[in-house]
Image (spheres, rainbow, N blue to C red):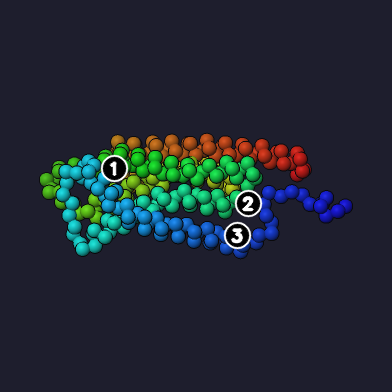
Amino acid sequence: MSESETEKPTRNDPSMSLFDHLGELRRRIIYILIVLVLGMVIGLLLADPAYDYLMAQEPVNSMALHAFSLWDGIGMYMKFALVIALILALPFTFYQLWSFVKPALAVKEQRAALGFVPLALVFFLAGLSFSYFVVFPMAFEFTSGVSRHLNLEETYGITQYFAFMFNIIIPISLLFELPLVIMFLTKLRIVTPMRLRKMRRLAYFILIVIGTLITPPDFISDLLVAIPLIILYEISVMMSGLVYRKQQAADEAWEEEYGT
């Protein structure tokens, strides 16, 4: 029997060692860091129009922000640059993840996984909108209400205001990537929908804790954040199930054609 007859088709490249995989992962991470730095440069250029837009919105348009340090203005520019860089680098990051796992996927799976790249930006922007237009106003109104109740004179610094804002909107925006991350992990066969269902109670508890930490300590705000996060988890389970069923069908077809 010839060598070509004894070889079986494989979906992975077994010739790559662990060090080859680690080297490839290191190269992808370096690419991401380079794009992140370039994104921060672009972010510095876009910081002024972004700042002007946010300063024209409620509630800050009727407030006077102060600088309590000579570094406050520079810190504001860097915060805006980082947020803009994250928005620009996120699709590229998912593309690099796709490129890293691509050799382990079948052709159809590669095409399906490539669709995650634009979805990463869509989910992040959805989370950004939800956190800025829904969660942040509630958090600001609650904290300001407490200050007024205590008869405190509200004097805010620019660093404190934007740090308060970004500490709310960035974690929520990143959490909106949960369905895509779960689909990636399912494609890598690290998680399954059955395992996710078994972890549902623990996942709910963690998401509720996260929602409580990034919102004011009142029941309504916690509820308005925790419910979307739980829905995101359930969407993640559903999307994981779709990927898992396709994998099972592909594995069965593979075994029928080439044997176990």
The residue to which callout 3 is attached is: 21
| Mark closest to the chain's N terminus, 1 or 3 | 3
Q: Quadrant of the C terminus?
A: top right
Residue 129 seen? yes
> Regarding mark 1 in the picture, which secondary structure is present there?
helix
Q: Callout 2: helix, strand or loop?
A: helix
* Amino acid type at mark 1: Phe
The residue nearer to you, when weighing 8 against 175, is: 8
Separation of marks 3 and 2 at Cα, in angstroms: 11 Å
Which marked residue is nearer to the observer: mark 3 or mark 2? 2
**Residue at 20% over, 62% down:** 69
Q: Nearer the viewer, mark 2 or mark 1?
A: 2
Label 1 vs label 3: CA separation?
A: 41 Å
Mark 2 or mark 1: name the one nearer the start of the chain: 2
202, above or below 13, in the image: above
Q: Amino acid at mark 3?
A: His
Marks 2 and 1 sit apart, C-alpha to C-alpha, by 42 Å
Where residue 146 sits, quadrant-wise, is top left
Q: Which residue is mark 2?
A: 103
The image quarter containing residue 128 is top left
Mark 2, other Cα within 10 Å: few <14 / some 14–19 / many ≥20: few
Where is residue 124 drawn, in percent x and y?
41, 44
Q: Is residue 250 left or right of residue 186?
A: right
- Judging depth in this view, the residue of 96 and 172 nearest the camera is 96
* Numbered mark located on residue 136 in the image: 1
Q: Is residue 249 left or right of residue 47?
A: right
What x and y, as percent, mark residue 122?
A: 43, 41
